[in-house]
Image (cartoon, helix red, strand yellow):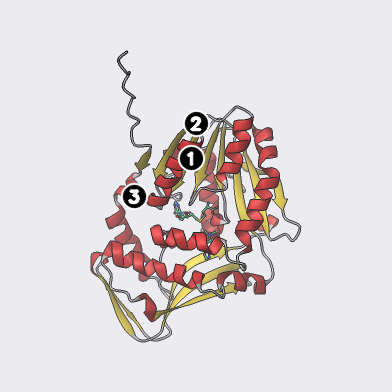
Amino acid sequence: MPQTPAIPRGDPVRRTRTVERTFEAMAAEVRAGLSGRPLPELPCKYFYDERGSALFEAITELPEYYQTRTETALLEAHAAAIVEALRPVELAELGSGAGHKIRLFLDAMRSRGRLESVVLLEISETYLRQSVDRLQADYPEAAVRGVVGDFLHDLPALGPGGGRLLLFLAGTIGNLHPDELPAFFREAAAALAPGDGFLVGVDLVKSPARLHAAYNDSAGVTAEFNRNILRVLNDRLDADFDPDDFEHRAFYDTDRQWIEMRLRARRPLIARIPAAGIELVLAAGDEIRTELSCKYTRESLTARLAGTALVVERWITDPECLFASVLLRRT
Ligand code: SAH
Ligand code: AVI
């Protein structure tokens, strides 16, 4: 009997225009950020090349970094009930990273016999490809695809909603500036149909000492993660930063309720980024802001939902109120 040739499956990962334009777009963003006054800034999405994603994975295992184990415990306890309540057929995830937590939902959907498709949107292409391949192998009944893109610009690439549960875990929403949240929530609502769910992991306001420890770990992994952004600029934009010239700094701003990560020059230096037409002159002690990690209360997060067609359906927290899994519903 002649064998029917297998239909080759096209590349399940596609790159958005934002990413296709990476070089010029990145040069423009870096130029704009570093010209910021009084403080030069870099967009935190540039932490995540392969090394940066691996460093983030190492952070999730640090004793001081309570976020990942707290959220995982919440999802282990509640994923099945969320799936039961929403009955989704598609799971979508923004900033999916190594793609561990999504399996809790996939298992719950599978056991109900309603798992049809999975779509991951992630800026780190290597991690995205690995996750897509592994999930496709382990959940062959689902069509798994990936989008290399930026969740601030590329949500339409998810395609139309309907039977969709969208995940945005880890507290990554805290890495957006609070003023960006309403527009981001409106875009997310547009990628959902009425009744669809949006599960957001939110790191909560808590003792500054606990937060300080989580972003200044004793093993120095967060410091390496912070400095990785300079390596990414060296690799992608041909910059000439020496990461060892910079000291990691992370502090909690109690008024703004956010952790701010910075890199502080240890000595006077000039860094060149020819691709972006930049010569950055820094005195010893000058700083570059690399990340915000905003902490929320139920009130401060809910205030950002006004007028977005998303409402809080469930607010689930751990006994210490460190972290919340917030189930939003598209009205
Ligand atoms: N969801 C995973 C990973 C969280 S880390 C977890 O729960 O552990 C944040 C992830 O978001 C990283 O994988 C990073 O590459 C991705 N990311 C950061 N900024 C992004 C952006 N603007 N667009 C898309 N992905 C982004
Ligand atoms: C991905 N994000 C939620 C992490 C955070 O805590 O803001 C990134 C991180 N930055 C320092 N440590 C971890």
Front residue of 211/29: it is: 211
Q: SS of the residue at dot 2?
A: loop
Q: Which residue is mark 3?
A: 19
Which one is earlier in the sequence, the residue at label 1 or at label 2?
1
In the image, what residue occupies the spot 69% across and 67% down?
206
Horizontal placement of 221 versus 123: left or right? Answer: right
In the image, what residue occupies the spot 51% across and 74% down?
220
The amino acid type of the residue labelled 1 equals Leu
In the image, what residue occupies the spot 24% across and 68% down?
277
Q: Which residue is mark 2?
A: 142
Circle 1 Cα neighbour tier, 10 Å, few/some/many (<14 / 14–19 / ≥20): many
User: How far apart in space, not on screen, are marks 1 and 3 (Cα)?
Assistant: 23 Å
The amino acid type of the residue labelled 3 equals Val
Q: Are marks 1 and 2 in contact (CB under 8 Å)?
A: yes
Percent across and percent down for residue 82 are: 67, 39
Asked if residue 281 shows in the view, the reply is: yes
> Furthest-front residue in view?
1
